[in-house]
Image (cartoon, grey):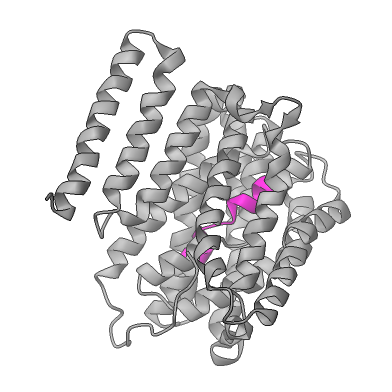
């Protein structure tokens, strides 16, 4: 009977086999079929990483890389089925994800406003100041250096910066021994403020690059966030303690939804991504890393505890790429405006996992381990 360790080792072996098959197909110019071994390579890695405490946080990211890789080779699978355009799934998927967020929310998520108002205020202000301004700067500078970075693609960089923090930030804060209660509070508040703040920031920072209808964007975000979260809160209130199956199902459904959203966007913007991809990856990575760095030091500047500084770093650096993608879809510019969010999503999961793993072995000096129960994934 093979041990658990041997079980996961087999997936590393299968990953190596699929990688060799992929390289062989590329060398032999069998590009039409190369997407499948690439998908299986990343799926095998995802299963293999599940057996490692250090790498388990990257398993979901490997799945995203696999499906995104397949969409680059076979975009036709993710564009349209019959007369139905798969891009029409993006908004409903975001609403499902936000509904799941609502079912896991309670008044406790806002208790941090009373307990640590300083940390909450700094976190929310840093979220809506640092990333939008960095996005605007990067879009402006990179646009001057690359003709392929069209105004709409550049606006997508600003869009991801103007979005609220994502649910993945809560996971990374938990793993990185940050202040989880503060993380939940900042994520909840920035998400609920997004329908009002994101459109105004986009109008101010990206209005010269792409046409922004502020009130339409407000309504679009309201539909994607406030209504489903409200429904989730009501559902949770009525069925409190009776929906354990939903608590288990929603994280899986959310991960599936995010992966499908990013894959659809990649397929829609494939041609542009193949042209601008390397530059966009560098720009997005700089954006993400600056968010971590400036977020952390904004906490240090105001003399917050180490765990709070870690929280603000992660909250600022990790954005809601799914919501940004939904906004791009509602604007009818998924193949351009949606590219930066599609690249940002997988990258932030990698960098966030690395940062959380590094912090995990370093308990904040003089602070007790976090005792908050964690339900979100």
Q: Residue furthest bottom?
A: 115
Residue 102 in the image: above or below residue 280: below
Whole-percent x and y of residue 146? 57, 27
Q: Judge by depth and name the residue closer to the eye, 224 or 113.
A: 224
Q: Judge by depth and name the residue closer to the eye, 89 or 202.
A: 89
Left or right side of 271 for 355: left
Q: Main secondary structure of the magenta part?
A: helix
Q: Judge by depth and name the residue closer to the eye, 28 or 301.
A: 28
Residue at screen point 53% across, 44% down = 259
Whole-percent x and y of residue 370? 38, 82
- For the record, the magenta segment spans 314-326
Corner quadrant of residue 171: bottom left
Residue at screen point 73% across, 50% down = 205
Any part of residue 166 in sight: yes
- Is 284 contained in the magenta span? no
Any part of residue 125 in sight: no
Q: Residue furthest top?
A: 28
Whole-percent x and y of residue 163? 65, 57
Residue at screen point 38% across, 78% down = 306
């Amino acid at each position: 009977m093979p041990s658990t360790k041997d079980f996961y080792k087999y997936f590393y072996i299968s990953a190596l086999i699929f990688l060799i098959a992929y390289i062989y197909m590329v060398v032999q110019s069998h590009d039409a079929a190369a997407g499948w071994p690439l998908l299986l390579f990343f799926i095998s890695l995802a299963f293999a990483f599940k057996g490692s405490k250090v790498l388990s946080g990257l398993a979901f990211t490997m799945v995203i890389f696999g499906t995104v890789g397949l969409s680059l080779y076979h975009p036709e699978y993710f564009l349209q089925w019959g007369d139905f355009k798969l891009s029409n799934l993006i908004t409903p998927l975001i609403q499902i994800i936000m509904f799941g967020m609502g079912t896991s929310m309670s008044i406790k998520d806002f208790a941090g406003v009373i307990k640590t108002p300083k940390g909450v205020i700094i976190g929310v202000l840093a979220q809506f100041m640092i990333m939008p301004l960095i996005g605007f700067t990067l879009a402006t500078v990179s646009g001057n250096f690359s003709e392929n970075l069209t105004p709409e693609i550049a606006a997508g960089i600003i869009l991801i910066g103007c979005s609220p923090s994502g649910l993945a930030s809560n996971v990374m804060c938990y793993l990185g021994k940050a202040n989880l209660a503060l993380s939940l509070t900042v994520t909840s508040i920035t998400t609920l403020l997004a329908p009002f703040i994101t459109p105004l920031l986009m109008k101010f920072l990206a209005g010269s690059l792409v046409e922004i209808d502020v009130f339409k964007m407000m309504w679009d975000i309201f539909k994607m966030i406030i209504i489903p979260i409200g429904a989730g809160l009501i559902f949770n209130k009525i069925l409190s303690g009776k929906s354990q199956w939903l608590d288990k199902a929603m994280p899986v459904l959310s991960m599936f939804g995010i992966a499908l959203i990013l894959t659809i966007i990649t397929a829609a913007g494939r041609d542009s991504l193949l042209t601008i991809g390397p530059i966009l990856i560098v720009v997005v990575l700089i954006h993400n890393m600056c968010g971590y760095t400036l977020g952390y030091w904004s906490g240090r500047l105001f003399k917050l505890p180490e765990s709070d500084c870690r929280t603000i770093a992660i909250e600022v650096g990790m954005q809601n790429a799914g919501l940004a993608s939904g906004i791009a879809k509602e604007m009818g510019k998924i193949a351009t405006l949606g590219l930066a969010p599609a690249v940002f999503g997988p990258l932030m999961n990698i960098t966030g996992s690395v940062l959380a793993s590094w912090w995990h072995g370093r308990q904040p000096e003089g602070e007790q381990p976090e005792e908050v129960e964690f339900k979100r994934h």
